[in-house]
Amino acid sequence: MTTPNAHDWLTEHSDYLYRFALARLRDTHLAEDVVQETFIAAIKSPSFAEQSSPRTWLTGILKHKIIDVMRKNVREIAASNLMNDEDANMDEFFDETGHWSEQPLAWDIPHDALQQKQFLTTLQSCMDKLPTKLASLFMMRDIHETDNEEICKELNITSTNAWVMLYRARMGIRKCLEINWLQA
């Protein structure tokens, strides 16, 4: 890769790569670091053969950098430690037959830009209350629609564990949104 391409790639793809990293890591400093490491790796690597677009190639490098950070910073947590005692009781949502005791409230899609921004702020606040791994899983699966196999690989978890964690994340988000958005 020549220097002009590196500069062009930086200006064209840095914002996209930063948003991609931030959505998965949920830490601005870590996201900045992995994007910087991605560009350094791309500059040092002669492996770009133009068989894909530069963005696809850079995103592939970034994914590996994110996985490295997650493996380094996130250790396995026992299922009992994923949520605090207050959040762990999800039985209140279901009756003895396992059906909803009360149907979830209808969530209208906000049409007003201000209302949508407030909703997204509330959603982010709810996600911030989740443990890091649960929030990352929720973001990857439900926001970015990443397939389960890739999620398991990135978070270094089993498929069964992913579904259990996703259930807990969704229940935590639901409870938080019902309290902070739907009843506000």
Image (cartoon, rainbow, N blue to C red):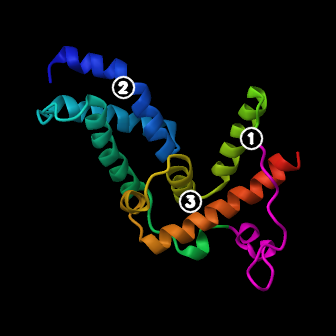
Q: Nearer the viewer, mark 3 or mark 1?
A: 1
Earlier sequence position, callout 2 versus callout 1 = 2
Distance (Cα) linking label 2 and label 1: 31 Å
Q: Position of residue 82 (x, y in %)?
A: 59, 68
Segment colored magenta? 84-108
Asked if disc 2 and disc 1 are in contact, CB closer than 8 Å, the reply is no
Q: Secondary structure at mark 2?
A: helix
Q: Position of residue 142 (x, y in %)?
A: 56, 52
Give the total of numbered labels: 3
Q: Nearer the viewer, mark 3 or mark 2?
A: 2
Determine which of the numbered discs, if any, sits on residue 19 in the image: none
Mark 2 packing: few (<14 Cα in 10 Å), some, or many (20+)?
some
Earlier sequence position, callout 3 versus callout 2 = 2
Q: Is residue 165 above or below residue 46?
A: below
Q: Secondary structure at mark 3?
A: helix
Work out which residue is located at the far top of the displayed protein and give it: 4
According to the image, label 1 marks what residue?
A: 109
Residue 18 in magenta? Answer: no
Earlier sequence position, callout 3 versus callout 1 = 1
Prevailing SS of the magenta stretch: loop
Tell me the amino acid under the disc marked 1.
Ile
Residue 175 lies in what quarter of the image?
Answer: bottom right
Determine which of the numbered discs, if any, sits on residue 134 in the image: 3
Residue sitting at 73 percent across and 34 percent down?
116
Q: Is residue 154 left or right of residue 83?
A: left
Mark 1 packing: few (<14 Cα in 10 Å), some, or many (20+)?
few
Q: Is residue 114 above or below residue 26?
A: above
Residue 104 in magenta? Answer: yes
Distance (Cα) linking label 3 and label 1: 24 Å
Residue sitting at 83 percent across and 54 percent down?
179
